[in-house]
Image: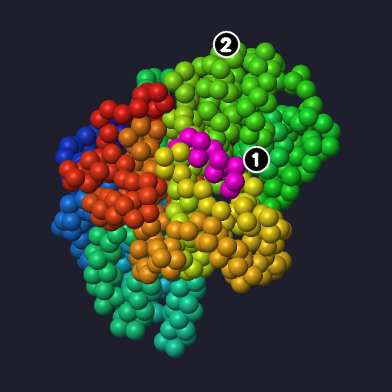
Amino acid sequence: MAELGVKMEVGFDGVAVITFSNPPVNAFAISIFFPLKRDGFSCLVIASLKDKVGEAMSREDVKAIVLTGKHGKFSGGFDINVFEKVQQTGKLSLLPDLSIDLVLNRIEDANKPIVAAIEGLALGAGLEVAMGCHARIAAPKAQLGLPELSLGIIPGAGGTQRLPRLLGLPKAIEVMLTSKPILSEEGKKLGLIDAIVPSQELLKVSRQWALDIVDGRKPWVRSLHSIDKIGSLSEAQEIIKLARQQAKRTAPNLPHHQACLDVIEEGIVQGGYPGVLKEAKVFNELVVSDTSKGLVHVFFAQRATSKVPNVTDIGLKPRAVKKVAVIGGGLMGSGIATSLIVNNIYVVLKEVNPEYLLKGIKMIEANVRGLVARKKLAQSRADKALSMIKGVLDYSEFKDVDMVIEAVIENLQLKQKIFSEIEKACPSHCILATNTSTIDLNLVGEKLKCQDRVVGAHFFSPAHVMPLLEIVRTEKTSAQVILGLMTVGKIIKKVPVVVGNCTGFAVNRAFFPYKQSAHILLLLGVDLFRIDRLISNFGLPMGPFQLEDLSGYGVAVAVGKEFATAFPDRSFNSPVTDLLIRSGRNGKNNGKGYYVYEKGSKPKPDPLVLPIIEESRRLANLMPQGKPISITDQEIVEMVLFPVVNEACRVLEEGIVVRAADLDIASVLGMSFPKQRGGIIFWADLVGSKHIYTSLKNWSEKYGNFYKPSRFLEERAMNGVPLNAPVSTPKTTSSRARL
């Protein structure tokens, strides 16, 4: 059993070393999560830390204190489980007083010097506690940061006040607003860290440093009172003004960025202590905001994807995957191969002829160069990655591969032929994966003897950049194969989400109404550029029409046919795309679509597309009495997104995903649904299923079956049950994620 809590040891030198332990990252936890005592450690980490510091202050044999963490880490910060509990209950009283009671009163204003000995990481409240100490000694490469804004809150234990005073205002703002840590070496250069020493000397040097403060040989620094790095008031306010402007551009839907700057400015204008008081007030307001609820939900949802019933809980061990064959070197195949080689997995790339093979290799090289240019990959790693790929024109190199990922065009007969060939060419343990985004996996593998090895590996484009990997299982796919692909997904830094087998799988299935609902609005007389602008303001990176331009109209037509065949009762076929193609437009591919695309410029609305839209409206004849509908901005957003919620409800009802949170994280990572809204189902529950149901029912009576509420949505709305509540028994059992 791992040691939990805090203990203190007083040495012959009079230094009390207080060590906190709460694996894996020594999070500061509270009593509602740790009611027990084990191995001499009190499990109430925060309460016990206060007690131990108080005890050290009162003991005559203690001259100074060193705070440190066990297991090679200082602290990863406050226990995020507490935020979730507060948000579920609304009880702010669950939050302990870290800022005033612990960091300020007991640590910074202590009558004996306290030194933080930092190894591994000091993040969030961990760094805030360290900044309250009178000196900070760190091991090399320790991570230092305040990532609270990634959870929709601000630092809540004095971080907004002390970091600018130790690091300097510009860098402190950058660290907080980006939630990106710095290393101890940079911290030393800028003044956050007092000394860097090898790990094995960390406690020794920290003890001596504390004694040197006692003897006056080192300064006794209370950082909340330091002002030398702040500069003049006018300089500081100008820096904050520029940061506000940048935050408006880069984080327009994240109000807590501006709130953080408000609190920083309060401390500079009024002083550190008033700044700490305002920080505590704003922190309590933000922790129960919808933005924080959404971001905390995404945090936990991403981690929950690694738990799949009947796969990860039955004692299986994943087999090593050292060599992967990728069939097809086009856009997807080259991206998949890139993801593998930059993460030290050997790749055999197969193509049908030398010309296509050379083109695929060049695309991989360009991908790797792009990663280097964006500082995502060191040049030395890039060189190694490119040495790990081999191009082939036959199956001779497939005899020792651990996995094959087929990434050819969406043609069932071609895929069936390839799978018949690789079944013979590959070893018996080899995972046989397809990157299909639309074709039924049962059909792909129906002629094979080893259908238990067939699985979907649905990457999103560009595959070496997008973080989501949908792992598609059939009823015959073995748990060992699922676990193997999940493991590879994590190695190549993807978030693997296990889903069931149906047209579109989970993400594309749930979002197929997205474009169609936008087209209905367009044909009802709503301005397309208004629709795009409102969806962008909602938080998606672009609106549905610009997205259509980006993906190309050929893709839109092909995908539309697939969904129309699968779901004829609720698919809408718009005449717009065909008319655009006939007029010679193909979106970004040829520079002309709904927008005009010129190199070096942002897309601009093209007024020449409006006559095509008018013709489409005439053909569709949807406008009541031939006149555009009157509609509010909110109604536009709802008419685009509520049909997505409706289809997502069917995905839940059919058991296509293991849990609603999987669909949330998939919508965020695969479709760029705004992270701060928590994912499509989480957002829908905030809006309220009753409102969504009533709206869809009203629109279905006006505009047809496309908007007809699903049975699942109707039942949940009528019974007041959240959409994210577990589904007891999926209505359709032929293709389920949980099996």
Point out the residue furthest to the top here: 449
Above or below, comparing residue 714 to residue 143 in the picture: above
Residue in the image at 63% along x and 38% along y: 336
Q: Position of residue 321 (x, y in %)?
A: 59, 25
Q: Which mark is residue 56?
A: none
First to last magenta residue range: 556-567
Q: Which mark is residue 449?
A: 2
Please identify the quarter of the rendering in which residue 25 is found. Answer: top left
The N terminus: image quadrant: top left
Q: CA distance from mark 2 to mark 1?
A: 27 Å
Q: Main secondary structure of the magenta part?
A: helix
Helix, strand or loop at label 2? It is loop
Helix, strand or loop at label 1? It is helix
**Residue in the foreground of this view, choosing between 667 and 349:** 667
The numbered mark, 2 or 1, whose residue comes first in the sequence reads: 1
Q: Position of residue 586 (x, y in %)?
A: 67, 56
Q: Is residue 246 left or right of residue 157?
A: right
Name which residue type carries label 1.
Met
Q: Which residue is mark 1?
A: 332
Q: Position of residue 5 (x, y in %)?
A: 25, 43
- Taking the magenta stretch, the answer to whether it contains residue 559 is yes
**Residue in the foreground of this view, choosing between 548 and 131:** 548
The C terminus: image quadrant: top left
Residue in the image at 31% along x and 41% along y: 710
